[in-house]
Image: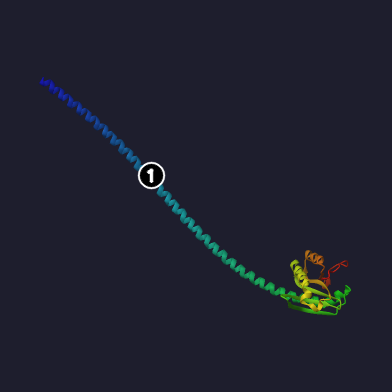
Amino acid sequence: MNEQIIYDGFERVWKLFEKTDREIQELKHFFHELSQETDRKFQETDRRFQETDRKFQETDRRFQETDRKFQETDRKFQETDRKFQETDKKISKVNQAIGQLGGRWGEFVESMVKPAVVRLFQQRGLVVHEVHHNLTSNRNGLSAEIDLLVTNDEYCVAIEVKSFLSVDDVKEHRERLEKFKILFPRYSDAKLLGAVAGAVIHEDVAKYAYRQGFFILGQKGENMEILNDEEFKPKIY
């Protein structure tokens, strides 16, 4: 009986050892797999960190390249701005020179027109008694300047003289004539005619002036001539 009890106890202890050993092996196997998984995850994390670091380095390189390009672009913009400023100065000088030249051209054209007006209008049957130069007037808040005024006892012709005659010049002269008799009342009873003169008159400008009823005085060969045809009927203002 005692031997059986001992045997049974030994059997139980042995089975307990076997179970414990199996559990220990299972536990060792679990920790081994856990260790491998942890190591794999650490390796993956390290790989990702290295990839992230590579990307950061690449991004930094690109930022540095972009910054270099921005600096180069800014330098080019500054250089372009400097050139624009130099060009603007040159254009200002050219415009100033053109303005001075335009003034001289105006004087030159007036010196050609003034001596010719008596002959030109007499050829059109208008006897000239007087020729006035640079008349100015300010009345009732209005003002105007007439480059040349040709008169006789019945007519007066107000002439606008330009180096390069434009449509705007013709429009301004028409407006000038519409207030002429207010500004120069001594001619209120005269039949007012308009004329424009220029060293250079483009065809479209000449046609526009013709339609406004203006005489057109321009260069023809070496002489100043009235360019209107014989059918032209001047407008009386």
Q: Residue furthest right?
A: 125
- Please give the count of numbered marks on the rendered protein: 1
Report whether 14 appears left or right of 30. left
Observer able to see residue 101: yes
Q: Residue at x 86, y 74 (%)?
A: 121
Colouring rule applied to residues:
rainbow
In percent of width and height, residue 237 lies at 82, 71
Amino acid type, callout 1: Arg
In percent of width and height, residue 150 lies at 82, 77
Q: Residue at x 52, y 61 (%)?
A: 74
Location of the N terminus by quadrant is top left
Dot 1: few (<14), some (14–19), or many (≥20) neighbours within 10 Å? Answer: few
Q: Residue furthest front?
A: 140
Q: Nearer the viewer, residue 220 or 207?
A: 207
In percent of width and height, residue 135 lies at 76, 78
Residue highlighted by disc 1: 47
Q: Nearer the viewer, residue 66 or 210?
A: 210
Res 131 → quadrant: bottom right
Q: Residue at x 79, y 74 (%)?
A: 159
Observer able to see residue 165: no
Q: Residue at x 48, y 58 (%)?
A: 67
